[in-house]
Amino acid sequence: MTFDNRGVGASQGKTPRSVAMARDAAAFIRALGHHRVDLLGFSLGGFVAQVIAEEEPRLVRKLILAGTGPAGGEGIDRVTPITLLDTLKAALTFKDPKEYLFFTRTANGKDAARQFVNRLKERTENRDKAISVTAFRNQLKAIHTWGRQKPSDLSVIHHPVIVTNGDHDRLVPSSNSADLARRLPNAQLTLYPDAGHGGIFQYHDKFVNEAVNFLDS
C-alpha cells in the first residue's frame, strides 16, 4: 500500500516543510486500523520512516530504507541546487528530470533511465496528479532541513532494516547509506553498481526479491 503525503497527489492540505510529516504518516496508518506495519521509505520517505521508527517503535515491524540517509548526512543539504540544475538540463534536452536525478550518465545508466521512464507511462488510468510548485519547494525545504539537522541517535532503532541505494547517488550521496547502515544496530546494506538515487528502480528485479525475502524471513 502506498499513500500520498499531505498536499501531494490526491491528498489535500499544505505539504509540510519538515520531516514532521512523519506524524501524518503515523496518523494515516492508524486511521486504516493497522497497529504494526512494515515501512518502505524512499528518499524523503526514508527520513520519514526513520522518525516513525524512532518515535513510534511499536508501530513498526521491519524497515526498508532506500536512497536515503541519516539526519545531518553529508551533502544532503545540497539537494536544491542539484535538483534545479538537473531539471533545467532535462528541459533543455526534452527528457524527464528523473533521468538525470535518479540515474548515472553512463551508457548503462542512460538505458536504465529510459526503461524506467517508459514503465512510468504504462499506467494510463488513475495516474498521479503532477506535484504543485509549492509542494515541490516544501519537500526540497524539508530535505535541506534534514541535511542540516543534528544527527539522531540511531542506536535506539532496533528493528530489522535493509538499507539500499545506488553506489553513485548524487541527491543523497551514497556514503550516507553506508553510514546509516553502520549506525543502525540491526541493518544490512545493499549498494547497486553503476546506479544513482533510483537504484531500486534500476535493479527492480533484484530489489523486489531481496525485499520479499527480508519481509518473509
Image (cartoon, helix red, strand yellow):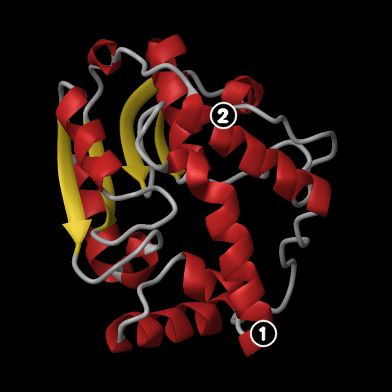
Looking at the image, residue 173 lies above or below residue 7: below
SS label for mark 2: helix
- What type is the residue that disc 2 sits on? Thr
For the residue carrying disc 1, how many other residues have a C-alpha within 10 Å: few (<14), some (14-19), or many (20+)?
A: few
Q: Nearer the viewer, residue 170 or 37?
A: 170
- Per the rendering, the mark at residue 48 is none
Looking at the image, residue 78 lies above or below residue 148: below
Quadrant in the picture for residue 25: top right
Q: Residue at x 72, y 49 (%)?
A: 136
Residue pointed to by mark 1: 92
On screen, residue 125 versus residue 86, left or right, reads right
On screen, residue 121 versus residue 126, left or right, reads left
Q: Position of residue 87 (x, y in %)?
A: 63, 69
Confirm whether residue 29 shows in the render: no
- Quick one: label 1 or label 2, which is nearer the N terminus? 1
Instruction: Name the quarter where the C terminus is drawn.
Output: top left
Residue pointed to by mark 2: 145
- What type is the residue that disc 1 sits on? Leu
SS label for mark 1: helix
On screen, residue 120 versus residue 126, left or right, reads left
Confirm whether residue 186 shows in the render: yes
Q: Position of residue 168 (x, y in %)?
A: 28, 62
Looking at the image, residue 84 lies above or below residue 3: below
Q: Nearer the viewer, residue 180 or 213?
A: 180
Q: Nearer the viewer, residue 195 or 186?
A: 195
Q: Residue at x 45, y 30 (%)?
A: 49
Tell me the distance, in whole angstroms, between the alpha carbons under discs 1 and 2: 29 Å
Q: Position of residue 205 (x, y in %)?
A: 28, 69
Q: Position of residue 196 (x, y in %)?
A: 34, 64
Looking at the image, residue 131 lies above or below residue 85: above
For the residue carrying disc 2, how many other residues have a C-alpha within 10 Å: few (<14), some (14-19), or many (20+)?
A: some
Q: Residue at x 34, y 49 (%)?
A: 173
